[in-house]
Amino acid sequence: MRLASGAPKDEATGEYAPFETQLADALVDLCSGDIAEQSDGDRANVVLHVDHADLAVGVGVGETEIGGMLLSSEAVQRLTCDCNVEEFFEHGGIPVGFGMKRCTADARMRRELRRRDEGCRFPGCERRRWVHAHHILHWTKRGPTDLGNLVLLCSHHHRFVHEMRWTIRGNPYGTPEFVRPDGTVLGRAPARHRRVAA
């Protein structure tokens, strides 16, 4: 409750997010902190069933394996933005093979992202913990998992980009712009510079 009530106003709207949203973000932050302290690489496996073609164009829905919860295509794209994808191939509803696609930033890339971005790059956001590596051009649209296509975003602003249809343009090494769904530019994300010892 304390973590949720300490959430700042959103720089884009000048308003506070609904309290339920603040509570959900706080829960994600608490769980992320707990998960980050665990060493098991398979510690948090969420299995989604989604048609790859639908995911690529942002239509349809995904379904969680446990509980059968339906998720919008935007939510599925956010959840698969930085993940490993297990692909199962079927013929007539019968599994005939599987493969693995790596869409996550590896440990070296994450270290460099943290050094370069220092936290969420959304203009005015100062969150530095529990940030996600966001593909500016989603991997389903052939966006590469490399530093030139990744930017750090907190959970709240990651949702803005995927589910509220904001876009990011420009070079993440410089000052990328965050563009509202109506095409107006909020502003440029601050360029982050590595501190050099004197």
Image (cartoon, helix red, strand yellow):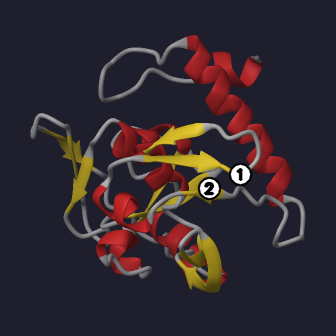
Residue 146 at x, y percent in the picture: 42, 82
Image marks 1 and 2: residues in contact by CB distance under 8 Å: yes
Q: Quadrant of residue 20?
A: top right
Residue 126 appears left or right of 136 = right
Q: What residue lies at 11% left-to-right and 34% top-to-bottom? A: 182
- From the viewer's side, name the closer residue of 98 and 165: 98
Marks 1 and 2, how far apart at CA: 6 Å
Q: Is residue 15 visible?
A: yes
Looking at the picture, does residue 29 appear above or below residue 32?
A: above
Element at label 2: strand
Residue at the image position 40 percent from the left and 52 percent from the top: 121
Locate residue 173, reporting x and y percent: 31, 72
Q: Which residue is mark 2?
A: 48
The numbered mark, 1 or 2, whose residue comes first in the sequence reads 2
Q: Amino acid at mark 2?
A: Leu
- Kind of residue sitting beneath label 1: Glu
Q: In the rendered view, would you say 146 is above or below 134?
A: below
User: In the image, what residue occupies the spot 28% across and 59% down?
Assistant: 57
Tag of residue 89: none
Image quadrant where one finds the N terminus: top right
Of 131 and 158, which appears nearest the observer? 158
Residue pointed to by mark 1? 65
Query: Does 17 appear above or below 165?
Result: above
- In the displayed structure image, the side of residue 165 where residue 45 appears, left or right: right
At mark 1, the secondary structure is loop
**Residue 122 at x, y percent in the picture:** 37, 46
Q: Nearer the viewer, residue 99 or 101?
A: 99
The extreme front residue here reads 92
Residue 6 in sight:
no
Residue 135 spot, x, y in % from top left = 40, 66
